[in-house]
Amino acid sequence: MFWRCAAVAQTVAPPFQNPLPAQDNNGNQSNPPPFQRFRRQAPAEFGPPSSAFVPPANGAGDTGFDSTNARNKRRDTSQRPKAQSNIFAIEPPLQAPGGTPPRQTPPPASASGANASFAAAGQPGQPPVEIGPVRKPPKKRKSGEDDPYAPLGVRAGSFLLYPAIELIGGRDSNPGRVENGRGAWLYTLAPELLARSDWSRHELKAELRGSYTGYSPDETPTLSRPYFNGKIDGRIDVRHDTNINLGTRVLVSTDNPGSPNLQAGLAKLPVYTTFGGNAGLAHRFNRFELSANLDAERTEYQHSVLTDGTTASNKDRDYDQVGGTLRGSYELLPGVKPFVEAGADTRTHDLETDFSGFRRDSKGLVGKAGSSFELTRQLTGEIALGYLRRTYDDPRLPDLEGFIGQGSLTWAATALTSVKMTAASTAGESTIPGVSGILYRDLGLQVDHALRRWLIFTAKAGIGFDEYVGDIRRDKRFSLGAGLTYKFNREVQVKGEVQENWLHSNVSGNDYNATIFLLGLRLQR
């Protein structure tokens, strides 16, 4: 224990140095103290050493520490003090004769070697403090640092706007989606605008996407068609744990080419519009959250233009839908939130019966259970499984029912690779006599890999099942695609993509395949 104490005493300089004891004319100490501290030598000046050989333990006192660590049996240890229990204890400074405080020796400005991991405590009587390596706090990442090619947006007051437009050209081997269809060149103009508020409370965000696709040479019926999908969502923070959610949406589109719902002899595809809104209330009880939502929408079809110049009404396809959803969720773990959801809706058509004599008003029930994920930003999304049932007023139309799945899951596999999975199930209306509706089920998988930060490779795969309830027809859809995106900077990108689509039906005459080549330019801000 004594040797450990002496080692620490030599490693760390004492805050004070004792004065030299009194000596007589012969050099002998007069009245020596019971414990004589060794006198610490001043550090040597820079330059060549004074002698070629320095004996070991040079400068140590009679009772000091021998750095050679060699045992000396002739050493007089009669006056050796007892080892202290605390090796870091520092004795109080001795007073010089006459009460004059001893001279204070400041610690060295820097340490090296064995002293590098220690520093003076700064207060008298405290032991040295082991500080170890100094770790700097992590720097906060700036916005857009992960993706140097992400758009910066435009600030308009308290809103951030992200405008963009895509100019796409290519060729489709079968734009009509019919068996042995003819190919055509295509062009697409697709503007979009994303906006979100930058408020400390409440939130307002909008997504507006549109496109127009034209074909050359164009056949009859013309396949050129518009598309627009816009929605605005808002959140009002009533209290810390209570929110009001509001939203509105508009969808403008046409039936897909080759759909059995289309009339014969069309000159162009009829356009339909679906618009609606929702309002809901959400409240959190600690980890448990309960939300209720009401939704209403309307769907209207334009008149169909026939090849002989006449028009045909689609009034029997117009309907209103009103529904509600109740959802309860519990935060089981940070980022993991299981939920249970139940919903009901009614569809009421403008005409009591369609042009085939069927009453198509219906009521629907759906129940789902799943969970939302946010695990260390590597696995995020939401996935749910459930059951859907829709009953019709006309007893000749069977119930549309079956298992459904919905969700979107994103997995950041590595810093360069991300995987996204999507699932959706919807119940569509039908105009086919005796068919209640069409149950669509779709699964999609997309993998993005950054070959370089400015060069992104994308692979897509999808499968879909179409069930015509009330008829024997069953369709299977498959799609594969690969693309490459070259990012010049934050504002300009070039895209190239190839797609292959198939449809196999158990009813003859409905199979088709199509190959699509696309090349586009994206401008964004």
Image (cartoon, rainbow, N blue to C red):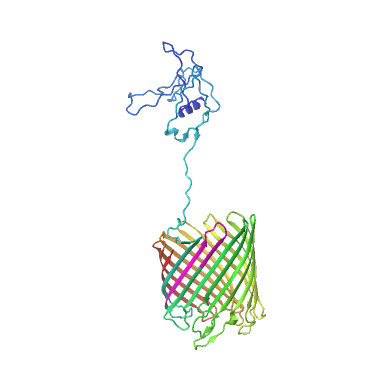
Q: Residue furthest front?
A: 157
**Closer-to-camera residue (27/412):** 27
Instruction: Name which quarter of the figure residue 148 lies in.
Output: bottom left
Query: What percent of the width, then of the height, locates residue 314?
Result: 57, 82
Q: Is residue 343 above or below residue 32?
A: below
- Magenta span has 198? yes
At x 61%, y 83%, the residue is 354
Q: Quadrant of the C terminus?
A: bottom left
Residue 365 appears anywhere in the view: no
**Closer-to-camera residue (508/501):** 501
Q: Residue furthest top?
A: 25
Q: Residue furthest bottom?
A: 308
**Closer-to-camera residue (303/56):** 303
The stretch in magenta equals 185-207
At x 49%, y 35%, the residue is 130
Query: What percent of the width, then of the height, locates residue 276?
Result: 58, 71
Query: What percent of the width, then of the height, locates residue 345?
Result: 64, 71
Query: What percent of the width, then of the height, locates residue 163?
Result: 46, 66
Report how many numbered discs are placed on residues in the image: 0
- Magenta span has 231? no
**Closer-to-camera residue (85/136):** 136
**Relative horizontal placement of residue 343, taking residue 46 as reference (left or right):** right
Instruction: Name which quarter of the figure residue 61 lies in.
Output: top left
Q: Is residue 502 above or below residue 524?
A: below
Q: Main secondary structure of the magenta part?
A: strand
